[in-house]
Image (cartoon, rainbow, N blue to C red):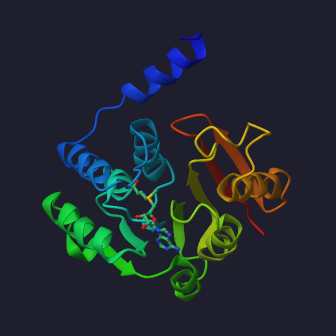
Amino acid sequence: MSKLERNWQYAEQYPTETAAISRARRLSLELGIEPVSRSVGAMLSGLTVLSRAEAICEIGTGVGVSGLSLLRHAPEATLTSIEIEPEHLREAKTVFAEAGIPAAKLRLIEGDAMHVMPRLNLAAYDLVLLDADPTRLLDHLEHALAIVRPGGSIVVPGAFSHGRVPDPAARDEATRSMRDLLAVVADSPAIAPILSPAGDGVLTLVRLDG
Ligand SMILES: C[S@@+](CC[C@H](N)C(=O)[O-])C[C@H]1O[C@@H](n2cnc3c(N)ncnc32)[C@H](O)[C@@H]1O
């Protein structure tokens, strides 16, 4: 194993998780849903506090690993989470309830993000997580930029698309979609991008003022 691989593995194993997040992670893997990794979950937990996020929006609830991570240190925050699969949402409701998240802090919406996001309030969210359909990233970004406030952040896990983004031979739709997103935000005057190698890569986009 190379030094970089050892560093990565250490960073993945380092964060502790609550019992509720660990249970959600196990359930997620049983159902074949890919949750955010431990280090990405820890990043989300910290980012919420760092940005003093009160209104959070998540696209791709899964069964709640990322949602619980976002709310972990932010008891005052409210989470709007959009999920297209009714079964995932049903499981997520149980996961959030068992974790003791008050119903008033949660808005779980069943539907396609492409239809739901345009109905959300403009510039109303401090933090937006995009973890749904990896082939629609530019569309999701457009809607996310409309609903995130200036100074707020958009977080996109899976930025390496299972390691395929840096591989020039990889040409599948999800990988091309991620490359397009990375290219668009690289020198956008409206966005400050941060690409981290945590998990399968995390792209954090800070919406600049103006
Ligand atoms: C990678 S999983 C999300 C994992 C979750 N964020 C977590 O960390 O626990 C992607 C989820 O997005 C949902 N999804 C896929 N396309 C969607 C769409 N167009 N709108 C809303 N949700 C979608 C899938 O059903 C799946 O539950």
Q: Which residue is drawn at 46% across and 25% down?
A: 11
Q: In this view, does 40 lie above or below 178?
A: above
The residue closer to the viewer here, 104 or 203, is: 203
Residue farthest to the bottom, as pictured = 119
Q: Seen in the image, is 178 located left or right of residue 34?
A: right
Q: Which residue is drawn at 55% across and 65% down?
A: 133
Q: In this view, does 53 lie above or below 86?
A: above
Residue 103 rendering spot, x and y as whole percentages: 22, 74
The residue closer to the viewer here, 72 or 24, is: 24
Q: Which residue is drawn at 60% across and 34% down?
A: 197
Q: Seen in the image, is 156 located left or right of residue 100?
A: right
**Residue 146, image quadrant:** bottom right
Q: Which residue is drawn at 69% across and 51% down?
A: 175
Q: In this view, does 141 lie above or below 70?
A: below
Residue 170 rendering spot, x and y as whole percentages: 73, 44
Instruction: Report the quarter where the C terminus lies.
Output: bottom right
Residue 16 rendering spot, x and y as whole percentages: 29, 32
**Total label count?**
0
Which quarter holds ligand 1? bottom left
**Residue 96, image quadrant:** bottom left
Residue 10 rendering spot, x and y as whole percentages: 44, 20
Q: Seen in the image, is 181 located left or right of residue 29?
A: right
Q: In this view, does 207 lie above or below 105?
A: above
